[in-house]
Amino acid sequence: MGMAKYLGKRFIQSIIAVFGITIIVFIVLNIAGDPVKLMLPDTASYQEIEEMRQKMGYNDPLIVQYLRFLGNALRGDFGTSYKYNEPALQIVLERIPATVTLAVSSMMIALVIGIPAGMISAVKRNSITDTVIRSLALLGQCVPAFWLGIMMMLLFAVKLKWLPTSGFDTWSSLLMPSLTLGVFTAATITRMLRSSMIEILGKEYIDVAKAKGLGRYVIIIKHAFKNALSSVMTVIGLQFSSLLGGAVITETVFAWPGIGRLLVQSIENSDFMVVEIIVIFMAFAIVIINFIVDILYCLINPRIKLQ
Amino acid sequence: MDDTILKVENLNVVFNTKYGCAKAVNQANFSLKKGQKLGLVGESGSGKSVISKSIIRLLASPPAQISGKILLEGQNLLELSEKKMEVYRGNKISMIFQEPMVCLNPLFTIGNQMMEVLIKHEKITKKEAKSRSIEMLRTVEIPSPETRMKQYPFELSGGMRQRIMIAMSLLCHPEVLIADEPTTALDVTIQAQIIDLLNNLNRDFGTSIIMITHDLGVIAEMVDTVAVMYCGNIVEKAPVADIFDTPKHPYTEGLLNSIPSMEDSGKDLEAIEGSVPSLYDLPKGCPFRNRCKYVRKVCEYHIPPTVDLGGRSVSCFQYTDQWEVKE
């Protein structure tokens, strides 16, 4: 049972990583100073500030504060947002569905475009098709999201009136933000998959597969793509976790109610509790996605499964 | 009707690259009878692998430009569409490669990779494909074949993988098996086992074998007929005993002289003077003339013709009338 052991090890590592992240987040926020001054009016006296500090526990030793923070966090209590005066967790949770929807749909677009494009590009290497795909991929990686978003909005919303400029209710409002984000990810996947496929197609076992008389598609999809995928999967995972972390610019352009925009607003407002939760959520997302990538990697590669 | 299975006629392979035009194979002619074992010998870059890959059509074209005829049971393989060629590969003609460690796909089991050959070429159920694969693994003397079917390549040694490659290539009982230096990457004891195995399979199935190698020891132990290649040319072709007893071409002679022998121990090893010219820059006339100890004026201007010496042939002016002309 090599796989269970391997995944068990990775799982424990993930938990340690999550703990480490909470410590770092906690320390960084502490270095940034306590929010007591923000909570009190400018006219508050030193006496009043000190009293407030004492009351909120900011005078306790750091380790005590951290354990209290951790204990509360485990119970789902992340404190109150200073800006909205509501439980911070609730504010973030309200925004998460929008971000997840956007991340998933952009990823779908990226995979649907990126995988075939990368494969075709590699199989027809140095052809005109390949050149076109490579140029588009380069362009897709270079075009800034704010420009692409605004241009699409001008064309599809303002000129053609096919799609709404913003909103969050219908699939049509999801389309443009997903495309804006998906194009970049698709370009990244295309380029990675192309180089990975080219490497695999040069391997001896591909010649062997040809010598066996197997058809072109069996060779490309079964023998080459599955091998190429294992190296591209890491990149897909990284891209997806960064999408889950929210896309500040795209969310701003399309007034998308996700956590990216919330994060920037909360930093501006020094709304520490909200920032804290979002950072922890992002970290969680990365750790979980990495763990899922590990599982998939195990499923694809028998070497890990068995050793 | 004669029992010729494979006939290669005037095969030329040219690579057009940015460095220039390389003639990798020049007017190659040979034929293979049913059950015959032909050895293609030559040093690296002499074109032996190019010939083998042209026969099974694995050379990417372009850059390779192939002309001539490769007739398998009368059918010119070079004229077939890619789709039709698939029917021949792995079925009527198959190939084993030099590096067994990298010839199997790491992500699939041995069983999966064997069964796909049968499923592609024959109307057969999965169950039948499985039992025939197991049977073939047993034929190539792999212990506990049922277990091997479920294993992945990384769990097996190089010798074992080469046996599996051989089993895989013989699944559909091909007419011709091309073995491209199948023992080069293996250690000597395993080499001997693989050669024995190929000899046995040739005897039992009647499969014709084209053995490509630079190892004259392998040639001596295995083949019936030898074709010696130099810079893309087949310079001599003869039954194996004749090659070793009475080499006709100066290059063959040089090759045989450079084999170390027990009697000569203590003496310096003989070598052929000079080195192989680049294919991009072959000398005019005979490609071997720069290294040949018998070289004459005529060798510099003309490519030597292939002379039939009755049961064997050689490409050298020594055996033509032109040699008589005194300089």
Image (spheres, coloured by chain):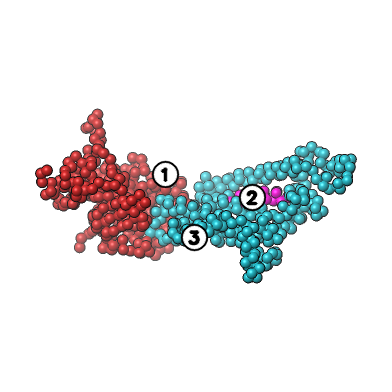
Chain colours: A cyan, B red
How much space separates mark 1 and mark 3, taking CA atoms?
Answer: 44 Å
Residue at mark 1: B157
Locate residue A251: give its quadrant. Answer: bottom right
How much space separates mark 1 and mark 2, taking CA atoms?
Answer: 39 Å
Asked whether the residues under the numbered discs 1 and 3 touch, taking CB atoms below 8 Å apart as contact, a structural biologist would say no
Residue B316 place in picture, x, y as percent: 18, 47
How much space separates mark 2 and mark 3, taking CA atoms?
Answer: 33 Å
- Secondary structure mostly taken by the magenta-highlighted segment of the chain: helix
Any mark on residue A283, and which? none
**Whether labels 2 and 3 share one chain:** yes
Q: Earlier in the sequence, mark 2 or mark 3?
A: 3
Going by the numbered disc 3, the residue's amino acid type is Val
Q: For mark 3, give the secondary structure.
A: helix
Asked whether the residues under the numbered discs 1 and 2 touch, taking CB atoms below 8 Å apart as contact, a structural biologist would say no
Going by the numbered disc 1, the residue's amino acid type is Ser
Q: Is A106 contained in the magenta span?
A: no
